[in-house]
Amino acid sequence: MTGRSDFPNGFGNGITLKGVNIDVPISGEAFWVNGSTTAANIAKGAIGGSDGNKGSYKQPFATVDKAITSCSANRGDTIFVMPGHSETVTATSINLDVAGVTVVNLGQPENQATYTFNATGSTITVSAAGCAWYGGLHQSTILDCASAFTLGAAKGTTVAGGIFEDTSSILNFLSLVTTGATDNDADDLTVEGNTWYGLNTTPLAVVSILAAELRPIVRGNKAYLAATSGGEFITLAAKIVSGAEFAGNYHVVVGATGTTTGIFLTGSGSTSTGIVKDNFVSSLDTTTELIATAGTGLVFHENYYTGVADKSGKLWPAVDVA
């Protein structure tokens, strides 16, 4: 085990990453990851990693999954991924399957950890409760990569502060976060402060909730999408969510006139509870201007929509004035 001594600049709460506050546990172990093993990177000051190392600051692991396997469940362990780290994500290469583990990707935009998704099934899997993933640059280099993160039995998952990029219109993500189909497996999901630059014209939703879940939070994210169909921010399918908070998101899509499903939110369940507020939505649809599919049961406050460039958005749903 590495112990506190491996954190060179102190250790505790209060880290902010891209505007997202991170509550770093203080009870567990700290492990370090850096896959920058080339001579050029090492010459620039990078610390070369190997999965044969002990995972300390001076002897980091080369892969995130090796660090995960070194953690203990519910101890509050934290994995710090060093600036300059790069890793190729496959369908099985990264699995957050140890409960209570937090992964923090360090670095500024020009040197942050980069994850390349090069197969349709490439995904970061979360299959244990109470895990969190903060930051990192995630790039798709394959047509229709299904989802950057896929959740199994993973209550209390957090995905926050990441940047997601399609590398072309045909090298793209379909979704960023997708739950499983088993009810309540992804209760207390938080998706916060992420940004997606999407170039494909027919993606799926930013967040796909495919089962009944309690207390999902999707807050403060930004999606700039070339989508002319699909590309909703949240889909609930026909599922019911309770105590939801969908707030403060920016959603910009190309869209199409006469869209019959919600541009920001779709779902056919009628008894969901929660609030949808302070979201800003843009689409070329000036006919229906449908932010959300009707009949979800959710309550809407102070959401704004525009279908025209260079014009300020208007309140949706419209407020009747007596």
Image (tube, rainbow, N blue to C red):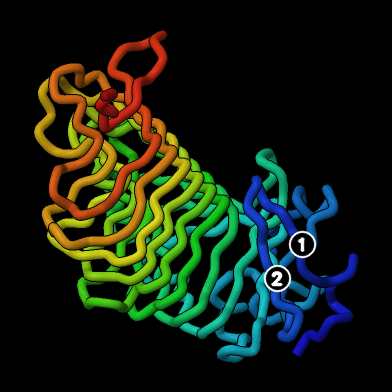
Q: Quadrant of the N terminus?
A: bottom right
Tell me which amino acid carries mark 2: Val
Q: Which residue lies at the image location 35% right of the left edge and 30% below the top edge? A: 281
Q: Which residue lies at the image location 13% right of the left edge and 59% below the top edge? A: 269
- Give residue 42's quadrant in the image: bottom right
Q: Quadrant of the C terminus?
A: top left
Q: Position of residue 15 (x, y in %)?
A: 74, 59
Q: Position of residue 299 (x, y in %)?
A: 29, 49
Tell me which amino acid carries mark 1: Gly
In the picture as drawn, the residue positioned furthest to the front comes out as 322
| Nearer to the camera, 38 or 117 | 117
Which disc, if any, is residue 24? Answer: 2
Task: Please say whether residue 118 is visible from this viewpoint.
Answer: no
- Label 1 sits on residue: 14
Task: Please say whether residue 272 is visible from this viewpoint.
Answer: yes
Q: CA distance from mark 1 to mark 2?
A: 7 Å
Which disc, if any, is residue 126? Answer: none
Q: Position of residue 115 (x, y in %)?
A: 52, 54
Q: Which residue lies at the image location 35% right of the left edge and 73% below the top edge? A: 186
| Nearer to the camera, 235 or 268 | 268
Count of numbered badges drawn on the protein: 2
- The local crowd at label 1, few if under 14, some if 14 to 19, many if 20 or more residues have their Cα within 10 Å, is few
Whether the residues at callouts 1 and 2 have beta carbons within 8 Å, the answer is yes
- The local crowd at label 2, few if under 14, some if 14 to 19, many if 20 or more residues have their Cα within 10 Å, is some
